[in-house]
Image (cartoon, rainbow, N blue to C red):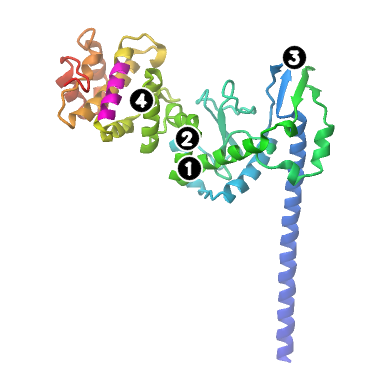
Amino acid sequence: MKKHLVFISTFILFLASCQKEATSTQKNNQKDHTSMDNEITTLKKQLEKGVKATIGDAVDYQIEYSDDDLKIEEQLLTEILKKHGFKSLNNEEFKIKIKSIFTREIDYSSNKEFIYINNFSKCSRDPIYFKNNVIDFDGNFIFKHNKFIAPLLAIPELIDYEKKYPAIIDYEKMLSTEYLNKSGDKIKIKKWRNESKLMQQRNLTIQTTVARNKYLFNDSKADFTWLKFNDKPFLESLVKIHGYYNDEDLNKFVLEKNSSNLDELGKVLWIEKCDGKFNINQKLFDVISKSSEEDKTKYLNAISEYLSKKVNSNSSDFDNKFSNKAEVLGKIAYFCTKVVSKKNRDYDFFSILGSDDGGKKYEEEFKKNNFYGISDFKQFWDDTKTGGITYPGME
Protein backbone atom coordinates (compact mmCIF):
# COMPACT_ATOMS: atom_id res chain seq x y z
CA MET A 1 0.00 0.00 0.00
CA LYS A 2 2.84 2.39 0.90
CA LYS A 3 4.57 1.65 -2.41
CA HIS A 4 1.35 2.44 -4.24
CA LEU A 5 1.03 5.81 -2.47
CA VAL A 6 4.68 6.70 -3.17
CA PHE A 7 4.19 5.91 -6.86
CA ILE A 8 1.07 8.09 -7.04
CA SER A 9 2.82 10.98 -5.27
CA THR A 10 5.85 10.73 -7.56
CA PHE A 11 3.59 10.63 -10.63
CA ILE A 12 1.69 13.73 -9.49
CA LEU A 13 4.96 15.61 -8.92
CA PHE A 14 6.15 14.53 -12.36
CA LEU A 15 2.95 15.79 -14.01
CA ALA A 16 3.23 19.11 -12.13
CA SER A 17 6.83 19.51 -13.27
CA CYS A 18 5.89 18.74 -16.88
CA GLN A 19 3.01 21.21 -16.73
CA LYS A 20 5.30 23.92 -15.31
CA GLU A 21 7.90 23.28 -18.03
CA ALA A 22 5.22 23.32 -20.72
CA THR A 23 3.87 26.62 -19.40
CA SER A 24 7.38 28.12 -19.37
CA THR A 25 8.04 26.90 -22.92
CA GLN A 26 4.71 28.31 -24.06
CA LYS A 27 5.53 31.70 -22.53
CA ASN A 28 8.96 31.73 -24.19
CA ASN A 29 7.41 30.81 -27.54
CA GLN A 30 4.87 33.60 -27.17
CA LYS A 31 7.66 36.01 -26.28
CA ASP A 32 9.73 34.92 -29.29
CA HIS A 33 6.69 35.21 -31.56
CA THR A 34 5.93 38.72 -30.28
CA SER A 35 9.57 39.71 -30.70
CA MET A 36 9.58 38.42 -34.28
CA ASP A 37 6.34 40.25 -35.08
CA ASN A 38 7.85 43.51 -33.76
CA GLU A 39 10.99 42.91 -35.81
CA ILE A 40 8.98 42.34 -39.01
CA THR A 41 6.82 45.41 -38.39
CA THR A 42 9.88 47.60 -37.82
CA LEU A 43 11.68 46.07 -40.81
CA LYS A 44 8.77 46.91 -43.12
CA LYS A 45 8.84 50.53 -41.96
CA GLN A 46 12.58 50.73 -42.56
CA LEU A 47 12.25 49.21 -46.04
CA GLU A 48 9.58 51.79 -46.86
CA LYS A 49 12.03 54.58 -45.96
CA GLY A 50 14.85 53.06 -48.00
CA VAL A 51 18.57 52.99 -47.41
CA LYS A 52 19.03 56.50 -48.81
CA ALA A 53 16.66 59.28 -49.80
CA THR A 54 16.68 62.55 -51.69
CA ILE A 55 14.33 65.50 -51.79
CA GLY A 56 13.90 67.99 -54.63
CA ASP A 57 16.91 68.31 -56.88
CA ALA A 58 18.80 65.28 -55.51
CA VAL A 59 19.42 66.91 -52.13
CA ASP A 60 20.08 64.36 -49.38
CA TYR A 61 17.06 63.76 -47.19
CA GLN A 62 17.82 62.57 -43.67
CA ILE A 63 15.74 59.53 -42.73
CA GLU A 64 14.40 59.75 -39.19
CA TYR A 65 14.16 56.73 -36.91
CA SER A 66 12.69 56.22 -33.42
CA ASP A 67 12.94 54.32 -30.14
CA ASP A 68 11.13 51.42 -31.81
CA ASP A 69 14.05 51.05 -34.22
CA LEU A 70 16.52 51.20 -31.31
CA LYS A 71 14.64 48.47 -29.42
CA ILE A 72 14.99 46.07 -32.36
CA GLU A 73 18.62 47.11 -32.84
CA GLU A 74 19.32 46.34 -29.18
CA GLN A 75 17.64 42.95 -29.50
CA LEU A 76 19.68 42.00 -32.59
CA LEU A 77 23.01 43.38 -31.34
CA THR A 78 22.70 41.63 -27.98
CA GLU A 79 22.68 38.28 -29.81
CA ILE A 80 25.39 39.33 -32.27
CA LEU A 81 27.75 40.53 -29.53
CA LYS A 82 27.20 37.37 -27.51
CA LYS A 83 27.92 35.25 -30.59
CA HIS A 84 31.24 37.10 -31.07
CA GLY A 85 32.43 36.53 -27.50
CA PHE A 86 31.41 39.82 -25.89
CA LYS A 87 31.09 39.50 -22.12
CA SER A 88 28.44 41.76 -20.64
CA LEU A 89 29.34 43.67 -17.47
CA ASN A 90 27.07 43.94 -14.46
CA ASN A 91 25.20 47.19 -13.89
CA GLU A 92 27.75 48.72 -11.52
CA GLU A 93 30.76 47.80 -13.69
CA PHE A 94 29.09 49.24 -16.78
CA LYS A 95 28.08 52.40 -14.93
CA ILE A 96 31.69 52.98 -13.80
CA LYS A 97 33.05 52.37 -17.31
CA ILE A 98 30.62 54.78 -18.97
CA LYS A 99 31.43 57.47 -16.41
CA SER A 100 35.16 56.95 -16.97
CA ILE A 101 35.00 56.97 -20.77
CA PHE A 102 32.18 59.37 -21.64
CA THR A 103 31.63 61.25 -18.35
CA ARG A 104 27.97 60.24 -18.40
CA GLU A 105 25.93 59.04 -15.43
CA ILE A 106 23.65 56.01 -15.80
CA ASP A 107 20.59 55.90 -13.57
CA TYR A 108 19.17 52.38 -13.46
CA SER A 109 16.12 53.60 -11.56
CA SER A 110 15.13 55.67 -14.60
CA ASN A 111 12.80 54.34 -17.30
CA LYS A 112 15.06 55.86 -19.94
CA GLU A 113 16.41 52.98 -22.06
CA PHE A 114 18.85 54.82 -24.34
CA ILE A 115 21.42 57.57 -23.74
CA TYR A 116 22.88 59.46 -26.69
CA ILE A 117 26.54 60.44 -26.93
CA ASN A 118 26.92 63.34 -29.35
CA ASN A 119 30.41 63.69 -30.82
CA PHE A 120 29.56 67.08 -32.36
CA SER A 121 28.09 68.49 -29.14
CA LYS A 122 29.35 66.36 -26.27
CA CYS A 123 27.41 68.27 -23.60
CA SER A 124 24.06 67.85 -25.34
CA ARG A 125 21.69 65.31 -23.80
CA ASP A 126 19.18 65.31 -26.67
CA PRO A 127 18.91 62.04 -28.64
CA ILE A 128 19.36 62.23 -32.40
CA TYR A 129 17.39 59.75 -34.49
CA PHE A 130 19.28 60.19 -37.72
CA LYS A 131 22.04 57.90 -38.89
CA ASN A 132 25.66 59.04 -38.65
CA ASN A 133 26.94 60.77 -41.77
CA VAL A 134 30.06 62.43 -40.23
CA ILE A 135 28.97 65.83 -41.61
CA ASP A 136 25.72 66.51 -39.76
CA PHE A 137 25.46 63.68 -37.24
CA ASP A 138 28.02 61.61 -35.40
CA GLY A 139 27.25 59.77 -32.20
CA ASN A 140 26.48 56.55 -30.37
CA PHE A 141 23.69 55.30 -28.17
CA ILE A 142 24.33 53.71 -24.80
CA PHE A 143 22.02 50.70 -24.49
CA LYS A 144 21.95 50.67 -20.73
CA HIS A 145 20.00 47.46 -20.05
CA ASN A 146 22.11 45.19 -22.24
CA LYS A 147 25.20 47.28 -21.53
CA PHE A 148 26.89 48.16 -24.81
CA ILE A 149 27.22 51.12 -27.18
CA ALA A 150 26.44 51.42 -30.90
CA PRO A 151 25.43 54.01 -33.47
CA LEU A 152 21.87 54.00 -34.79
CA LEU A 153 21.71 51.02 -37.15
CA ALA A 154 18.86 49.71 -39.31
CA ILE A 155 17.91 46.03 -39.43
CA PRO A 156 19.41 45.38 -42.92
CA GLU A 157 22.77 46.58 -41.54
CA LEU A 158 22.73 43.83 -38.93
CA ILE A 159 21.08 40.75 -40.46
CA ASP A 160 20.47 39.20 -43.88
CA TYR A 161 16.79 40.13 -43.74
CA GLU A 162 15.94 38.50 -47.09
CA LYS A 163 17.30 35.16 -45.87
CA LYS A 164 15.59 35.40 -42.47
CA TYR A 165 12.27 36.61 -43.89
CA PRO A 166 11.96 35.38 -47.52
CA ALA A 167 8.40 36.68 -47.78
CA ILE A 168 9.71 40.21 -47.29
CA ILE A 169 11.42 40.11 -50.69
CA ASP A 170 8.17 40.50 -52.63
CA TYR A 171 7.00 43.15 -50.18
CA GLU A 172 10.06 45.31 -50.83
CA LYS A 173 9.83 44.78 -54.58
CA MET A 174 6.30 46.19 -54.60
CA LEU A 175 7.25 49.29 -52.60
CA SER A 176 7.19 52.58 -54.45
CA THR A 177 10.46 54.47 -54.86
CA GLU A 178 8.67 57.72 -53.96
CA TYR A 179 6.56 58.92 -51.07
CA LEU A 180 5.40 62.18 -49.50
CA ASN A 181 6.78 63.20 -46.13
CA LYS A 182 4.77 64.95 -43.41
CA SER A 183 5.40 68.32 -45.08
CA GLY A 184 4.10 67.06 -48.42
CA ASP A 185 7.55 66.97 -50.06
CA LYS A 186 8.23 64.22 -52.58
CA ILE A 187 10.94 61.90 -51.30
CA LYS A 188 12.79 59.54 -53.64
CA ILE A 189 14.34 56.48 -52.08
CA LYS A 190 16.95 53.88 -52.90
CA LYS A 191 15.81 50.43 -51.76
CA TRP A 192 17.93 48.38 -49.40
CA ARG A 193 17.78 45.43 -51.82
CA ASN A 194 19.53 47.56 -54.45
CA GLU A 195 22.49 48.41 -52.22
CA SER A 196 25.22 46.55 -54.11
CA LYS A 197 27.69 46.16 -51.25
CA LEU A 198 25.22 45.62 -48.43
CA MET A 199 26.70 42.30 -47.32
CA GLN A 200 30.26 43.72 -47.12
CA GLN A 201 29.01 46.81 -45.32
CA ARG A 202 27.04 44.66 -42.88
CA ASN A 203 30.05 42.52 -42.06
CA LEU A 204 32.19 45.62 -41.44
CA THR A 205 29.48 47.24 -39.31
CA ILE A 206 29.20 44.15 -37.14
CA GLN A 207 32.97 43.74 -36.83
CA THR A 208 33.37 47.42 -35.90
CA THR A 209 30.59 47.35 -33.30
CA VAL A 210 31.94 44.17 -31.74
CA ALA A 211 35.51 45.51 -31.66
CA ARG A 212 34.47 48.80 -30.04
CA ASN A 213 32.56 47.08 -27.27
CA LYS A 214 35.11 44.35 -26.61
CA TYR A 215 37.87 46.97 -26.43
CA LEU A 216 36.00 49.36 -24.14
CA PHE A 217 34.25 46.89 -21.85
CA ASN A 218 36.27 43.66 -22.12
CA ASP A 219 39.73 45.31 -22.36
CA SER A 220 40.48 43.34 -25.53
CA LYS A 221 43.93 44.26 -26.86
CA ALA A 222 43.30 42.34 -30.10
CA ASP A 223 40.23 44.47 -30.81
CA PHE A 224 42.13 47.65 -29.95
CA THR A 225 44.74 46.68 -32.55
CA TRP A 226 41.98 46.08 -35.12
CA LEU A 227 40.43 49.48 -34.36
CA LYS A 228 43.80 51.22 -34.83
CA PHE A 229 43.83 50.08 -38.44
CA ASN A 230 40.11 50.22 -39.21
CA ASP A 231 38.42 52.77 -36.94
CA LYS A 232 40.88 55.56 -36.17
CA PRO A 233 38.26 58.36 -35.84
CA PHE A 234 36.46 56.47 -33.07
CA LEU A 235 39.64 55.92 -31.07
CA GLU A 236 40.67 59.56 -31.49
CA SER A 237 37.23 60.79 -30.43
CA LEU A 238 37.60 59.02 -27.08
CA VAL A 239 40.59 61.21 -26.20
CA LYS A 240 40.03 64.40 -28.22
CA ILE A 241 36.30 64.79 -27.60
CA HIS A 242 35.47 62.90 -24.41
CA GLY A 243 38.75 63.16 -22.52
CA TYR A 244 39.25 59.44 -21.92
CA TYR A 245 42.86 59.41 -20.73
CA ASN A 246 43.11 56.16 -18.75
CA ASP A 247 44.51 53.89 -21.49
CA GLU A 248 48.24 54.36 -22.03
CA ASP A 249 48.22 52.54 -25.38
CA LEU A 250 45.36 54.73 -26.61
CA ASN A 251 47.19 57.89 -25.50
CA LYS A 252 50.32 56.74 -27.31
CA PHE A 253 48.39 55.99 -30.51
CA VAL A 254 46.50 59.30 -30.54
CA LEU A 255 49.61 61.34 -29.70
CA GLU A 256 51.53 59.79 -32.60
CA LYS A 257 48.66 60.50 -35.01
CA ASN A 258 48.27 64.15 -33.98
CA SER A 259 51.71 65.41 -32.98
CA SER A 260 52.40 67.07 -36.33
CA ASN A 261 49.21 69.18 -36.33
CA LEU A 262 49.25 71.80 -33.55
CA ASP A 263 45.49 72.37 -33.46
CA GLU A 264 44.79 68.64 -33.23
CA LEU A 265 47.61 68.22 -30.73
CA GLY A 266 45.84 70.71 -28.47
CA LYS A 267 42.75 68.47 -28.45
CA VAL A 268 44.93 65.60 -27.25
CA LEU A 269 46.54 67.72 -24.52
CA TRP A 270 43.36 69.06 -22.90
CA ILE A 271 39.60 69.42 -23.10
CA GLU A 272 37.01 71.70 -21.60
CA LYS A 273 34.51 69.64 -19.63
CA CYS A 274 30.77 70.21 -19.63
CA ASP A 275 30.96 71.82 -16.19
CA GLY A 276 33.25 74.53 -17.61
CA LYS A 277 36.39 73.14 -15.99
CA PHE A 278 39.52 72.25 -17.93
CA ASN A 279 41.03 68.78 -17.88
CA ILE A 280 44.70 68.28 -18.81
CA ASN A 281 45.75 64.91 -20.22
CA GLN A 282 48.30 64.36 -17.48
CA LYS A 283 48.82 60.69 -18.37
CA LEU A 284 49.98 61.72 -21.83
CA PHE A 285 53.20 62.98 -20.25
CA ASP A 286 53.85 59.53 -18.81
CA VAL A 287 53.72 58.24 -22.40
CA ILE A 288 56.18 60.93 -23.51
CA SER A 289 58.49 60.15 -20.61
CA LYS A 290 58.64 56.47 -21.62
CA SER A 291 59.19 57.23 -25.32
CA SER A 292 62.48 56.82 -27.17
CA GLU A 293 64.78 59.85 -27.11
CA GLU A 294 63.93 60.57 -30.74
CA ASP A 295 60.17 60.47 -30.14
CA LYS A 296 60.48 62.37 -26.88
CA THR A 297 62.29 65.17 -28.68
CA LYS A 298 59.66 65.21 -31.41
CA TYR A 299 56.74 65.38 -28.99
CA LEU A 300 58.27 68.00 -26.69
CA ASN A 301 59.23 70.20 -29.63
CA ALA A 302 55.66 69.97 -30.90
CA ILE A 303 54.26 70.96 -27.50
CA SER A 304 56.73 73.86 -27.29
CA GLU A 305 55.45 75.10 -30.64
CA TYR A 306 51.89 74.68 -29.42
CA LEU A 307 52.60 76.75 -26.28
CA SER A 308 54.29 79.50 -28.34
CA LYS A 309 51.34 79.62 -30.73
CA LYS A 310 48.73 79.84 -27.98
CA VAL A 311 50.61 82.39 -25.85
CA ASN A 312 50.46 84.85 -28.74
CA SER A 313 46.97 83.88 -29.91
CA ASN A 314 43.67 85.63 -29.20
CA SER A 315 41.63 82.56 -30.14
CA SER A 316 38.48 81.68 -28.21
CA ASP A 317 39.89 78.28 -27.18
CA PHE A 318 39.75 79.22 -23.52
CA ASP A 319 36.35 80.94 -23.55
CA ASN A 320 38.21 84.24 -23.99
CA LYS A 321 39.29 84.17 -20.35
CA PHE A 322 42.94 84.70 -19.46
CA SER A 323 42.48 82.74 -16.22
CA ASN A 324 41.55 79.65 -18.25
CA LYS A 325 44.41 80.19 -20.67
CA ALA A 326 46.92 80.56 -17.83
CA GLU A 327 45.71 77.39 -16.15
CA VAL A 328 45.86 75.24 -19.30
CA LEU A 329 49.17 76.54 -20.66
CA GLY A 330 50.73 76.68 -17.20
CA LYS A 331 49.89 73.06 -16.43
CA ILE A 332 51.13 71.88 -19.83
CA ALA A 333 54.41 73.73 -19.28
CA TYR A 334 54.67 72.21 -15.80
CA PHE A 335 54.12 68.62 -16.96
CA CYS A 336 56.60 69.06 -19.82
CA THR A 337 59.16 70.39 -17.37
CA LYS A 338 58.57 67.38 -15.13
CA VAL A 339 59.32 65.07 -18.05
CA VAL A 340 62.69 66.63 -18.83
CA SER A 341 63.67 67.33 -15.20
CA LYS A 342 63.92 63.59 -14.59
CA LYS A 343 66.95 63.61 -16.88
CA ASN A 344 68.34 66.83 -15.32
CA ARG A 345 68.13 68.61 -18.65
CA ASP A 346 67.77 72.34 -18.93
CA TYR A 347 64.65 72.52 -21.11
CA ASP A 348 62.60 75.58 -20.32
CA PHE A 349 58.89 75.54 -21.13
CA PHE A 350 57.74 78.06 -18.54
CA SER A 351 59.77 80.88 -20.10
CA ILE A 352 57.55 80.61 -23.20
CA LEU A 353 54.76 82.00 -21.04
CA GLY A 354 56.93 84.96 -20.07
CA SER A 355 57.99 85.93 -23.57
CA ASP A 356 56.12 89.27 -23.46
CA ASP A 357 56.33 90.67 -19.93
CA GLY A 358 58.56 88.25 -18.09
CA GLY A 359 55.53 86.19 -17.13
CA LYS A 360 54.05 88.73 -14.71
CA LYS A 361 50.46 88.13 -15.85
CA TYR A 362 50.88 84.38 -15.59
CA GLU A 363 52.60 84.55 -12.22
CA GLU A 364 49.79 86.69 -10.85
CA GLU A 365 47.25 84.15 -12.06
CA PHE A 366 49.24 81.21 -10.70
CA LYS A 367 49.50 82.82 -7.25
CA LYS A 368 45.81 83.69 -7.24
CA ASN A 369 45.04 80.01 -7.74
CA ASN A 370 47.66 78.77 -5.25
CA PHE A 371 49.62 77.23 -8.12
CA TYR A 372 46.64 74.91 -8.73
CA GLY A 373 47.39 72.89 -5.63
CA ILE A 374 50.42 71.26 -7.26
CA SER A 375 53.16 70.96 -4.66
CA ASP A 376 56.23 71.67 -6.85
CA PHE A 377 54.57 73.92 -9.46
CA LYS A 378 55.94 77.10 -7.83
CA GLN A 379 59.43 75.63 -7.58
CA PHE A 380 59.57 74.80 -11.30
CA TRP A 381 58.07 78.18 -12.19
CA ASP A 382 60.62 80.08 -10.08
CA ASP A 383 63.52 78.01 -11.42
CA THR A 384 62.74 78.51 -15.08
CA LYS A 385 60.63 81.63 -15.61
CA THR A 386 63.60 83.92 -16.34
CA GLY A 387 65.65 81.53 -18.44
CA GLY A 388 65.97 81.46 -22.19
CA ILE A 389 63.78 79.09 -24.17
CA THR A 390 65.62 75.85 -24.72
CA TYR A 391 64.05 73.13 -26.81
CA PRO A 392 64.73 69.41 -26.79
CA GLY A 393 67.57 68.59 -29.20
CA MET A 394 69.24 72.02 -28.79
CA GLU A 395 71.67 71.11 -25.99
Structural distance between the alpha carbons of marks 4 and 2: 23 Å
Q: Answer left or right for 310 relative to 356.
A: right
Which one is in front in this view, the residue at disc 2 or the one at disc 1? 2
Disc 2 packing (10 Å; few <14; some 14–19; many ≥20): few
| Residue marked by disc 4 | 269
Q: Position of residue 68 (x, y in %)?
A: 70, 36
Q: Are marks 3 and 4 in contact (CB under 8 Å)?
A: no
| Residue marked by disc 1 | 223
Disc 1 packing (10 Å; few <14; some 14–19; many ≥20): some
Give the answer, above or below, for where 36 lies relative to 102. below
Quadrant location of the C terminus in the rendered image: top left
Structural distance between the alpha carbons of marks 4 and 1: 25 Å
Q: Answer left or right for 211 relative to 346.
A: right
Give the answer, above or below, for where 3 lies relative to 126. below
Instruction: Mark 3 or mark 1: name the one nearer the start of the chain.
Output: 3
Structural distance between the alpha carbons of marks 3 and 4: 44 Å
| Residue marked by disc 3 | 56
Structural distance between the alpha carbons of marks 3 and 1: 43 Å
Residue 229's tag is 2
Secondary structure, mark 3, is loop
Residue shown at 56% from the left, 24% from the top? 134
Q: Quarter-wise, where is residue 369 in the image?
A: top left
Q: Quarter-wise, where is residue 244 in the image?
A: top left
